């Protein structure tokens, strides 16, 4: 047997159609910038206890008949690197994507089809590189903006990490050895 490691994963992105012409060539490089992804626990979520009936002074508790939510809230942290010394391409891409939902400079908004990406894929592998789990989050969009550029500080030598929160309506979770 081999252990399951937290650091043997990759994240692949698609971006909304409106950004393809400007940022399409940068999408493949985004995978290399990913530092972490959080929010995967919703894949294993089940209904919680909620219904209680009283019977002769005792409680009988039942699971709720449905989940409180079926969407996924994901947080991806990405390294910021300057291409050719001045092109902050990772930040520029996600900022443009964020502006599709609501552009603060113009007040422009768009329909969901305009700001949603088809999918974001997470693959998890063993030390040999064999993928044993593939998760494809569908209908992905930026949820709440970007963080990481909120403070600059002379007292630190830390690099900036961009944090992007996403929402996905549903996911296709394929695990090797897990029967459907």
Image (cartoon, rainbow, N blue to C red):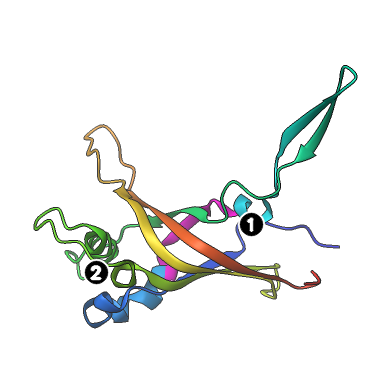
In the picture, the quarter occupied by the N terminus is: bottom right
Residue in the picture at 59% in, 65% down: 9
Residue farthest to the right, as pictured? 56
Residue sitting farthest toward the top: 57
Q: Position of residue 174 (x, y in %)?
A: 68, 72
Q: Looking at the image, is 19 positioned above or below residue 167? A: below
Categorize mark 1 by other alpha carbons within 10 Å: few (<14), some (14-19), many (20+).
some
Looking at the image, residue 18 lies above or below residue 44: below
Q: Nearer the viewer, mark 2 or mark 1?
A: 1
Residue drawn at point x = 25 percent, y = 75 percent: 19
Residue at coordinates 21% horizontally, 60% vertically from top-left?
99
Question: How many numbered marks are there?
Answer: 2
Tell me, yes or no, whether the two marked residues, 2 and 1, touch with CB atoms within 8 Å.
Answer: no
Q: Is residue 33 magenta?
A: yes
Rendered residue at 22%/39% (across/down): 152
Q: Is residue 76 left or right of residue 125?
A: left
Nearer the observer, 154 or 77: 77
Q: Is residue 61 above or below residue 72?
A: above
**The residue stretch that appears in magenta:** 31-40
Mark 1, secondary structure of its residue: helix
- Mark 2 secondary-structure assignment: loop
Is residue 80 magenta-colored?
no
Pick whichever of labels 2 and 1 is earlier in the sequence: 1
Q: Quadrant of residue 8?
A: bottom right
Give the labeled residue for mark 2: 83
| Quadrant in the picture for residue 29 | bottom left
Mark 2: few, some, or many residues within 10 Å (few <14, many ≥20)? few
Residue 49 x, y percent position in the rendering: 73, 37
Identify the residue position indicated by label 1 in the image. 43
- Residue 50 spot, x, y in % from top left: 70, 35
Residue 155, image x, y percentages: 26, 32
């Amino acid at each position: 047997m081999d252990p399951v490691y937290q650091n043997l994963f990759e994240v692949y992105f698609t971006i909304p159609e409106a950004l393809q012409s400007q940022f399409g060539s940068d999408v493949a490089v985004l995978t290399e910038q990913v530092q972490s992804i959080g929010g995967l626990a919703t894949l294993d979520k089940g209904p919680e206890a909620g219904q209680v009936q009283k019977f002769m002074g005792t409680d009988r508790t039942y699971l709720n008949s449905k989940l409180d939510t079926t969407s996924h809230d994901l947080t991806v942290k990405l390294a910021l690197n300057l291409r050719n010394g001045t092109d902050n391409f990772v930040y520029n891409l996600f900022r443009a994507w964020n502006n599709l939902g609501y552009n603060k400079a113009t007040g422009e908004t768009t329909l969901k089809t305009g700001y949603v990406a088809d999918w974001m894929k997470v693959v998890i592998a063993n030390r040999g590189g064999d993928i044993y789990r593939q998760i494809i989050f569908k209908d992905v969009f930026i949820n709440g903006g970007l963080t990481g550029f909120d403070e600059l500080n002379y007292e630190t030598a830390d690099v900036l990490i961009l944090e992007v929160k996403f929402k996905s309506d549903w996911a296709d979770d394929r695990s090797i050895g897990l029967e459907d």
